[in-house]
Image (cartoon, rainbow, N blue to C red):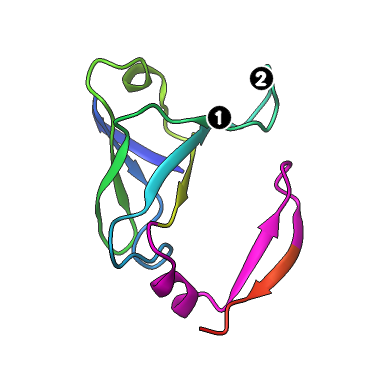
Amino acid sequence: MVQSRPEPTLAILTMGKRDASYDVELPLALYQHRPGPGPIPGAPAALPEGCAIVKMNDQHAYLQLPAGHAICDTLAVGDLVGCGISHPCTTFDKWPLLLAVDDAYNVRYGVNTFF
């Protein structure tokens, strides 16, 4: 979740090293979603090219936004940002059970990693 927007091209997320592992690269910022009613309730939108997690600390991720893009004006505190992992090894080691979801984000089943 976006916790702070301290600069026009920076968003601080409530995800850090404790939540998302990484070893080759930092997590990948993929989607944004604003909770509440909208044209397609619950449907996340792809983040524009140039959005990237550039730094992480224990409990926060630093999301760099592309200068001059509309997202610099529209991404707000409380918006959700969906991220992916860049490499699975550390994630599989840290999280021995992964939950698989359907397109509506309902948990369908769990996957044991046995890493």
- Say which residue appears at 68% left-offset and 60% top-offset: 100
Q: Is residue 87 above or below residue 34?
A: below
- State the image coordinates of residue 44 (x, y, percent, origin top left): 58, 32
Kind of residue at disc 1: Arg
Left or right, 90 with respect to 7, comes to right
102 drawn magenta: yes
- State the image coordinates of residue 56 (x, y, percent, origin top left): 26, 56
Q: Which residue is mark 1?
A: 34
Left or right, 40 with respect to 94, comes to right
| Residue 34 location, quadrant | top right
Q: Is residue 76 above or below residue 1?
A: above
Q: Which residue is mark 2?
A: 38
| Residue 10 location, quadrant | top left
Q: Are marks 2 and 1 in contact (CB under 8 Å)?
A: yes
Q: Is residue 71 above or below residue 29?
A: above
- Say which residue appears at 39% left-offset and 26% top-offset: 48
